[in-house]
Image: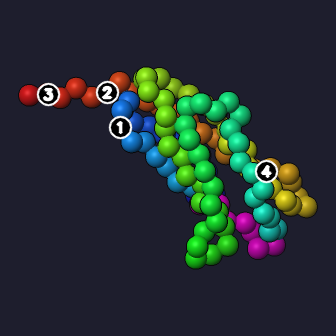
Amino acid sequence: MEPSVIRLHGASGDTIEQKLILKPDPEYPFAVTGIRATRGGDFDFSISALDTEYGYLVSTSNTKKEAGRYYDTLILDIESSIRKDIRIRVLGDIRPPEKNQH
């Protein structure tokens, strides 16, 4: 996975997004059958297949309006003989909006 942790850091009101690329090991292939958040509510997420190679693109974007921190876990349900899911940590650190200085 690149990156191994999703970090959503920025100022409240700004667009804060991060994408993660997930490529299965050729010796241990798997198919993603679903995605969900443990807590949910502070960010949106989606998953899609990569166009150019075997793998997946996980997209996340912050939805938290007020300043503060949050921690969550994305759970990707997979079809695999090795394991039943993949867990990805999501860390959010939302600062107060920046004030214009004149």
Q: Which circle, 1 or 3, is nearer the viewer? A: 1
The magenta segment is 21-27
Magenta span contains residue 101 = no
Secondary structure at badge 1 equals: loop
Mark 2 — residue? 97
Could you tell me residue 17's position as x and y percent?
46, 46
Q: Which circle, 3 or 4, is nearer the viewer? A: 4
Secondary structure at badge 3 equals: loop
Q: Amino acid at mark 2?
A: Pro
Q: Amino acid at mark 1?
A: Asp
Magenta span contains residue 26 = yes
The residue sitting at 39% across, 36% down in the picture is 10
The residue sitting at 62% across, 61% down in the picture is 48
Q: Earlier in the sequence, mark 1 or mark 4?
A: 1
Where residue 77 is drawn, which disc sits there? Answer: 4
Mark 3 — residue? 101
Q: Earlier in the sequence, mark 1 or mark 3?
A: 1
Secondary structure at badge 4 equals: strand
Could you tell me residue 39's position as x and y percent?
68, 30
Distance from disc 3 to disc 4, alpha carbons, whole Å, reads: 47 Å
Which residue is the extreme one toward the right?
81
Distance from disc 1 to disc 3, alpha carbons, whole Å, reads: 17 Å
- Residue 56's image quarter? bottom right
- Mark 3 surroundings: few (<14), some (14-19) or many (≥20) residues within 10 A: few
Label 2 close to label 1 by CB (< 8 Å):
yes
Could you tell me residue 68's position as x and y percent?
47, 23
- Compared with residue 18, is residue 94 higher up or lower down, i.e. above or below? above
Q: Earlier in the sequence, mark 2 or mark 1?
A: 1
